[in-house]
Amino acid sequence: MRQEEIYQVRRQRVFLVLSGIFLGSLAMLNIVGITRFLDLTFYVFGLKIPVTLAVGILPYPVTFLCTDLISELYGRKRAADMVWVGFLVNVWVVFILWLGGALPGASTEVAIDAAGRRPLFFEIQEYAFLIVGGSMVAYLCAQFCDVHLFHFWKRLTKGKHLWLRNNGSTLVSQLIDTVAVILIAHFFSKNGLPLDPDKGMWAQLIVMIASGYVFKLLVALVDTGPAYLAVKLLRPYLGLKQYEEVYSKEFSDSSDTTPLSDEQPTST
């Protein structure tokens, strides 16, 4: 097998792995969503810092690392395509959850148990439907913002300073995502978020937004090292020179198989 053919196989394989992690994290987010909230409150010099996180937020920052790596190695068009596929995955998850509830259950299924609870599936379905509308709107806004800003700073710096576009694009897009998810879930969902009626609504919403954003911010800063390491290892593995992007028949409508660098004009 020629060296170029080996590189093509590797490029497809790496793209599939990154896409798989990205799509799997999205599916997990919609399923677990707000089924549980984590209380990670801590104290600094006696000052209480309330931190309330939905469990579904845990895998979400990984999606931005995946889009940044695909943007860096495969170009803006591939990253945008993956964002749209992620949206379709969200739609598919919702459809399966709806279908699972619409079809008749087995004869052994108990509609309401002794504790007055419905089967576990319907609890998961309810929570998923509660968050999915907000998450899908926020997802599209945040991910496309991430891809756009990543390439804006990439062009501005001539392909240098990966740390700037990795962190800058993620921090802005994560803020959009966090605010949109919390506000849409509270004001436009059927049951809203589990807020304490004895406390101020906006105070609790701000705590949730701030907690989610700070968590994502810390993860974004921490993943700068892994992003640099991944790019450093993957470029030679994929047969790319510094600042080049994969631009092959497998990942482009063009017949030109020459990798593009930031200094070259692209069609995306």
Image (cartoon, grey):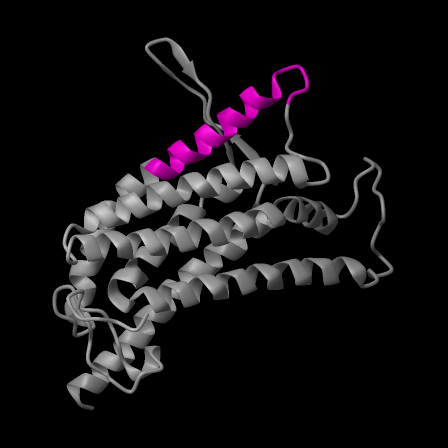
- Check the image and name the residue furthest to the top: 46
Tell me if residue 52 comes above or below residue 10 in the rendering.
above
Magenta segment, prevailing SS (helix, strand or loop): helix
Quarter of image, res 254: bottom left
Q: Quadrant of the C terminus?
A: bottom left
| 199 falls in the magenta region | yes
In the rendered view, would you say 87 is above or below 191? below
Q: Quadrant of residue 188?
A: top right
Q: Residue furthest bottom?
A: 1
Spot occupied by residue 104 in the image (x, y as percentages of width and height)? 84, 62
Left or right position of 233 against 268? left
Q: Is residue 265 above or below residue 62?
A: below
At a point 51% along the width and 47% down the height, the residue shown is 138
Q: Nearer the viewer, residue 252 or 235?
A: 252
Using residue 44 as the reference point, say whether residue 97 is left or right of it. right
Q: Position of residue 157 (x, y in %)?
A: 16, 53
Residue drawn where x is 83% and y is 42% of the image? 113
Residue at image position (21%, 46%) is: 164
Q: Is residue 26 visible?
A: yes
Which residue is found at the position 36% from the left and 42% from the top? 172
The residue range painted magenta reads: 196-217
Side of 225 relative to 121 (left or right): left
> Looking at the picture, how far across and down is residue 194, in whole percent?
65, 30
Q: Percent x, y for residue 211?
A: 45, 29
**Placement of 212 over or under 118, stated as above or below:** above
Quadrant containing the N terminus is bottom left
